[in-house]
Structures are given as structure tokens and as C-alpha cells.
Image (cartoon, rainbow, N blue to C red):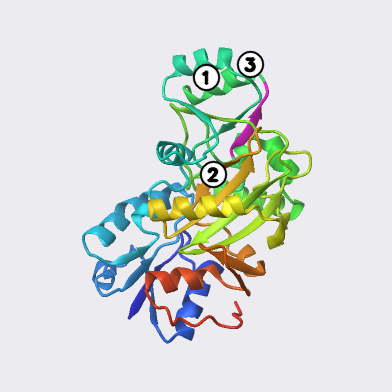
Amino acid sequence: MVVGIHKDRLGKFPDSLLIYEKILKYNNIDCIRLDINELDFWGKIKELDLFIFRWNVATDLKELAKTIIPIIQNYLNVACFPDMATSWHYDDKIKEYYLLKQHGFPIAESYIFWDKHKALEWAKNATFPMVFKLRGGAGSQNVLLVKSYYKARKLINRMFGKGINPNKLSFNTRVQLKDITLKRFIHKSMLRGYRIYTGEDLHAEWEKHKNYVLFQKFMPGNEFDTRVYVIGNRAFASRRFNRKNDFRASGSGRSDFDPEKIDKCFLETAFTISQTLKFQAMAYDFIYDEKGDPVITEISYIMPEWPIPKSPGYWDDTGKWFKGHFWPQYFVLMDALEFPDFRHPDFITL
């Protein structure tokens, strides 16, 4: 049995990938590192039992994943994580909305337009505030609370004009500076200066967003969201509290893992969606609407893995609680390799 893991966009193997390697080694399963740029890449792919490519929001990685995963999964018949069902809509809030809405799942009401005049006509009669989002972005980046028709009109004109680059600093410096640490700001500034000096493209990993607009209904009174991460028939959950003086929870770093405070309705809904749409793994961000009913604001096949081992356990799809601390990569591998006797290391040092 051989598992192949593709590098990230910088040619490195970050902690999230090293954990896969260490778990496989612990279970005496061969693991090889892969790079699409190597001439023997496709030869190695054909020998695999599982191909792992943890691609993220960077545009170049998206394009690469959309190019090779369908071929590897559908034509070479090599199991992939993520597979197509799990990832074709990743980091695209429009695809997520269309998919969940058409299946009747509780996605937050959104207003999506591909025509400038239709969008402006809608905005004249819309009830504000509304949440403006670009279709891509993580950690609450590219998300704004729009409080007036004037602001909405300005964003619509921008989106159907020169567009918006989804890099946070260029998109909304004031909001970014409020959240960023001094150390990180200095690092970003030095990196920007280096790229200017060397002539590198400052936004090589991003594509400009234009010719569409997405507004999501704003639901006040939510001081936190609840993130449910389903892997197979297991669900981990935590409450994520909003940033200070902000409506956004994603990226705040303020989480509570107490299982007694998790609304079990969120778990049931997440399991139903994952099983219906055959997701290998999926993170769901839940809040409450004005009636107190659960709604989903976003979904994502990946999330930062570090919160999961902090959780005191997980639920299965029958509601049974399993106590313990686990790496999410362990369950991904167990399911993908169909290896029920897979062993979880007591501790992994990185």
C-alpha cells in the first residue's frame, strides 16, 4: 500500500502534511512526496492507493487541483483526498449556495447577480445591512457589512468595473490592520518590499474578482458561530466567538470546545448533508436566523487542523460521544484507505 502526498504551493510540506506522513509511518504504510513538476509524476501516480493534495484558496493551487484530480480519480481510478464530490465547490461561496439551496439545506439566504443592472435594481429595494462577500477567501477575509444602498451601489459598480483583488491588505487595509499583529504586519511589509525589489508578482496567488456580486442576509444577535467538522461518520464541534466589536467569528482565535454547549441540531444537519452529498470531510459554519433556526454561512473541506486535537472528543452519526484527542488526518486516512484497524499515535512531534 502506497500513499502519495503532493507538496504545497511553496514546495514545502507544512505541519498539516507532516502529520499525514507520521501517521502513515506509525502504521507501516509507505508514503511518497509528489510534485507535478517532476517528470515521473504521472508514473508514480499510477502506483498509488491514495493521492492526497491539500489544496487551498490560492488561485494557482485551485487551477492545478481542478486539472489533475478529475483525471487521477475518474480515469486512473486512484482514490483521492479530497475527491471531486468533496472539493469541486471548495472556496466558492456561490457554488456552495447553489448546491445547498437546491437540496433544501439551510444555507443563509443570499442574493447573487451576474448582471450589473439587475444587481442595482435589487439594491434599491433591499433591506440593509447586508453582508458582502467575494466568492473566495478564508478567515473572514473579503467579507464586509454593508449598511446602506450607497455602499452597496459602490461595491456593485466596482465588481462590474475594475473588480476587486482578494488580497486583504489591498482590499480593506483598515479592517486588516485592526486584526493583524504587529509582528505579522512587519513580516507582510518586508515580504512585499522583497517582492517589489525582485520584480515578483505581488498577487501571484490571487485572481481578480469581477462581473458578479454576492450579498448574504445579515443575521444579528449571533455572538458566535458553531463550526462542525464532519469526517465520515464522526463530528467534531466548537463555538467560535466573534472578534471584538465585529460580527465575524472566523479568524478570531476565540474558541470553546465544551461539548455540552453544542447545539445537537447542528450536528444532525451536518451529518445529513455530508451523507447526502457524499462528502469525505466537511466543515460547516452555523449561526441562528431571526427565528432561532440554524443556518449555514459557509462550508469548506479543509480547516486549520490544530483545533481538532484540542477537542475532548467527537460524536458519531447516532449521537454517541467518544472521548479522546484525535488528529483529523487519522480519520481521513482510515476512511480513504478503508483500513478499520488503523492505529492512532499517542503523540506526534512535529
> Which numbered disc, 3 or 1, marks the residue closer to the eye?
3
Q: Amino acid at mark 2?
A: Glu
Q: What residue appears at the point 44 percent right and 47 percent down from the top-left corner? A: 59
Kindly state the secondary structure of the residue where label 3 is placed. helix
Kindly state the secondary structure of the residue where label 2 is placed. strand
- The image position of residue 30, as x and y in percent, is 38, 82
263 in the magenta segment:
no
**Residue lying furthest right in this view?**
245
Q: Residues within 10 Å of mark 1 (few under 14, many from 20)?
A: some
Question: Is disc 3 in contact with disc 1, using a CB cutoff of under 8 Å?
Answer: no
Which circle's residue, 2 or 3, is located before the other in the chain? 3
Q: Which residue is mark 3?
A: 150
Q: Amino acid at mark 3?
A: Tyr
Which circle's residue, 2 or 1, is located before the other in the chain? 1
Q: What residue appears at the point 55 percent right and 36 percent down from the top-left corner? A: 108
Kindly state the secondary structure of the residue where label 1 is placed. helix
Q: Residue 294, relative to residue 3: is it above or below? A: above
- Numbered range of the magenta stretch: 142-147
Q: Amino acid at mark 1?
A: Asn
Q: Residues within 10 Å of mark 2 (few under 14, many from 20)?
A: many
Q: Which residue is mark 1?
A: 157
| Lateral position of residue 82 relative to residue 198, left or right | left
User: Disc 2 and disc 1: Cα gap in Å?
Assistant: 25 Å
Residue 256 in view (yes/no) = no
- The image position of residue 20, as x and y in percent, is 48, 73
Q: What residue appears at the point 42 percent right and 60 percent down from the top-left corner? A: 280
> Which numbered disc, 2 or 1, marks the residue closer to the eye?
2
On-image quarter of the C terminus: bottom right
- The image position of residue 201, as x and y in percent, is 49, 45
What label sits on residue 298 in the rendered view?
Answer: 2
Quarter residue 15 falls in: bottom right
Q: Residue 34, relative to residue 74: is it above or below? A: below
